[in-house]
Each structure stands twice: as C-alpha cells, then as structure tokens.
Image: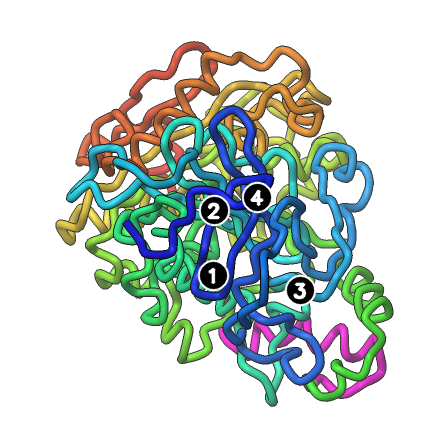
Amino acid sequence: MSEYVAEHVQDGPGVRTPNGVLRGALKDGVASFLGIPYAQAPVGALRFRAPEPAEPWEGIREATAFGATAPKRPYAPPLDALLPDPEVAGDDCLNLNVWTPWPAAGPGDGGPGDGGRAVMVWIHGGSLIHGSSAVPVYDGTAFARDGVVLVSVNYRLGIEGFGVFPDAPANLGLRDQIAALTWVRENIAAFGGDPDRVTVFGESAGAISIAALLASPLAKGLFRRAVIQSGAPSARSIDVARRTTEAIAARLKVPATAEAFAGVDPERLLAAQTAVTGKGNPVLSGHAFHIAVDGDVLPDHPGDLLADGASADVELLMGTNTDEYRLWFVPGGHTERVGSLAQRFLLRKGRISPRVAKVYREGRPQEKPGEVLGVLAADKLLRIPQNMLADYRLAGRTAATYLYEFGWPSPVLGLRACHALELGFVFDTLDLPETRALTGPDAPRALATAMHAAWVAFAKTGDPGWRPWDPARPVMTFGPGVPSLVEAPREAERRAWEI
C-alpha cells in the first residue's frame, strides 16, 4: 500500500498525498474527500493555457465541500427543472472528488495482484457547456459501498475549455481530463485504489470525451477500461470547431483570439456564449462546442483512430437509451410541431437518406413525424456509431466489447427512456429528489441494483455479466421488465444505414 496512506487525522478520515494532507468526511463506512485540486486555477496567466499541476499546501486541507464549478450558465427552461446543475463559486475549478471504502488501507477486492481496489473515474456530460461533479445524482457513495474507489472530475467548459484560438492550445477541457487522470495514477493508491485498474466512464459529452481519450496518444496508459453512455466518437476539424468561437467573438465585437477573450468580463463572455449556443441541441444542431482534431491531443478523428486499433487493449462497455431524443424534443414541443414537410426538410439538413427514413417510417406507423425524426437523429449520432465501433473492435480482435440499452420508460412528461435517465440507476441514487425530477417517485429499485452491479463488476473484472460482442450482436437491455440479453435489436433499422 502507498506510503501516503494515513488512517485518520483529528476529527475525520485523512489521507496524506504528495501535495499535503487532506481531511474528509466519514459516513457508514465510506470516506469522501471533495474539492481536491488536481491542477492550478486556470486564471490570470494560466487562462486559456494547458493545465499546470496543483501546488502543495501547508497543514491539513479540508476536503468536505465540493470545489468550484467551471464557469457556466444553468440549463434553459424547461430542462432546468429536469437536470440539476449546481454552481459553486470560485476560481479553482480544476478539482475532483474521491469516495472510498474506509479504512482505505487493507486488502482490495481480489483483483490482479490485489494491489488495491478498482477505481472508476466519472466525467460528467452537459454538451460541453453544462454540468459538474457536484450534481447530486453523481454521488459516489454507492460505488464505494460496493468496494470501488469513485472519482468524479470537473473540467473547463464552453469557450474556456473548448474554444479554438490561434494563440492557445485546443481541447483544453480534454487536457484537463488527462491531467485529472494523471493525478489519479499518481495519487489514488493513497485512497486505497489500484492505479493499474482504472475505469473511466461518462455520459453524453462525457462519453464523447472518453471516446476522444481512447483515441488520444496523450491518454495512453491512464486507464484500463472505459464506459461510454449515450455518446460516440465525435470531433470536428479545427476550422469547423472554430466557428462557434468566431460567432461569440462577432457578438462581443472582439478578435477571435485568446488574448482578446481574456480581456472580456467573465459574465459578459458567458452571456455571449449562451446567446450563440442557446438555440441549438444535439439533435437539431445549431452552434455548439466540439472536440477538435488538433494534431496533438487528437491526431485524427477519434472514430478513425479507434477503427485503426487505438486502445485495442482497453475493455469497453457502451450503450444508449431507447428514447434518447425525447429529452430534447418533448419538453420543447418538437414532437408535436414537426410535421411531414418539416421532417423531410430536417432529414435533408441532417444528411439522412430518404431510403433510411422510409425504413423507420414503415416500421413505426403509429409514431408522429417528429418522433420518427428524433429516433433517426439519435440513431445517427449514437446507436449506429457505437455498433460500428463494436464491429471494428471485433474484427480487430481487441479486448472485449459489451453493449447495453436502457429502456425503462419514465412517466415524467412522457419522456420515456430519454437521454440521461439511466444516470440515477448507474449511480444507485434513485432516492434523491434531483434524480426523481427525471425518473418520478416510483422508479424500479431492482433495475438500479442490477445496472449499478453491472458497472461495478465491469470495473472490478472487465466483465459486466453478459456475453461480449460477437457476430450475433448481443445487447443487454435494462428494462422495461427484468434485464435480458437481446440479439440484434431493431436490426432492420440498423441495416438500413449500411446499404
């Protein structure tokens, strides 16, 4: 066990790290250490620059409250009522949290060499402009209860993390994530974790980030397993990724340079960012921030790099929710407003073949044009790329790949199995009011137990409990009803994209 482990400090659980001593909180056998800096505050000379390692501190640092969140604005109504997004003031937003079984010292969970417990690192979603590790749904207590050291990470968002400038590095948010994973490798043994058994997992923009990390040479060796929830490999060229930066610069009437943006009041910058990106969504597009193919963090598109064998040795679990699109379509009324004519226009704009659309329409005769459009768009963005990646990995004889689908339908606003609904099940946080905003009060606890257990098993062993991907295309479905393995679900729709 690491020389840095400290069994206790006065009035709480303590850990001695290379940077200094931390004092956390202890409840029911789980110690939490919150707001730990993994890099220096990205302000002043470090704004729009790659993260620098955190500096040591004197004495005992209190780690009982979440650290500062990255600059952001709340979700716009009506999503703000469904997706909690707390804000914590401060400049030190490059911080992380650790939940671990306590005492941290002692035997692990029987993994290779028993050098400590399996570690899971959570990267939150939010379209690269929202979210933080302080979201209550992401509480790591249940993972620690079940023998996993859970780490959740903050990273720079929006223009601060994914702006593209001629005078600053690209992909700063991704560089932050890599810095956090480097911190985990160097420090997690002090919390009882095994640095050689790290699983990185995330949802939505967090999952897209993980696909990029899987492809990035700068992240190689920092994790052994990965979970991609409702995301897929996605990136844009530098020129395309720069367009949102340029649109914000035009609104601010300043040059599209990091130097010029650094002189803009942060609140004014956030207001301009919100005005430019506020009308888009992941399905209907619009101005958004993207991971960029920058030749450094990402030498090429992550999908191409992964197809060519990047991270072939990393075990992968990935999947989608049955009704992803409904989070973006239903609250805003798009399912009702989109008629047949608008559907055809939007399909053409989204470069979806009429032949593919015909297969979906014929297979869903009772669904409205807006609903069919939503399924098509979500499949194009998520399910089809995941299936393609699983096929590439199978052909390349890589480490095992597992696919799942989450299908339990929420009764809230008719959202059904929408985007982000699985999160409370994965974290086993169904009792929290912030989770119930999306699930309602009667979500099935047995399904959360099963899904959470699968994630724990994958982190510990590399096997979530079902057959890995093979030519029969097995997918573990979590609801409705009991979890069950289905081969090639909705195969006619999937095959339509191949022709």
Image position of 220 with respect to 198: above or below: below
Residue drawn at (63%, 49%) of the image: 132
Q: Is residue 445 above or below residue 69?
A: above
* Outermost residue, front side: 10
Q: Where residue 426 sits in the image (x, y, percent)?
A: 47, 30
The mark that comes first in sequence, 1 or 2, is: 2
> Which mark, by number, is residue 180?
1
Residue found at the far left of this picture = 397
Mark 1: few/some/many CA within 10 Å (<14, 14-19, 20+): many
Query: Marks 3/2: CA distance?
Result: 17 Å
User: For the residues marked 4 and 1, what is the alpha-carbon distance in whole angstroms?
Assistant: 28 Å
Task: Give the residue type at disc 3.
Answer: Asp
Q: How is the image coloured?
A: rainbow
Magenta segment, principal secondary structure? helix
* Residue 1, image x, y percentages: 27, 49
Q: Which is more foreground, mark 4 or mark 2?
A: 4
From the viewer's perspective, is 392 left or right of 416? left
CB within 8 Å, label 4 to label 3: no
Q: Is residue 311 left or right of residue 44?
A: left
Residue that badge 4 annotates: 10
Ranked by sequence position, the earlier of labels 4 and 2 is 4
Whether residue 303 is visible to the viewer of this picture, yes or no, is no
User: What residue is shown with label 3?
Assistant: 92
| First along the sequence among labels 3 and 2 | 3
- Amino acid type at circle 2 is Val
Q: Amino acid at mark 1?
A: Ala
Q: Could one spot residue 476 in this view of the protein?
A: yes
Q: Which residues are magenta?
A: 236-256
> Is residue 330 covered in magenta?
no
Q: Quadrant of residue 463?
A: top left
Query: What residue would you read off at disc 2?
Result: 151
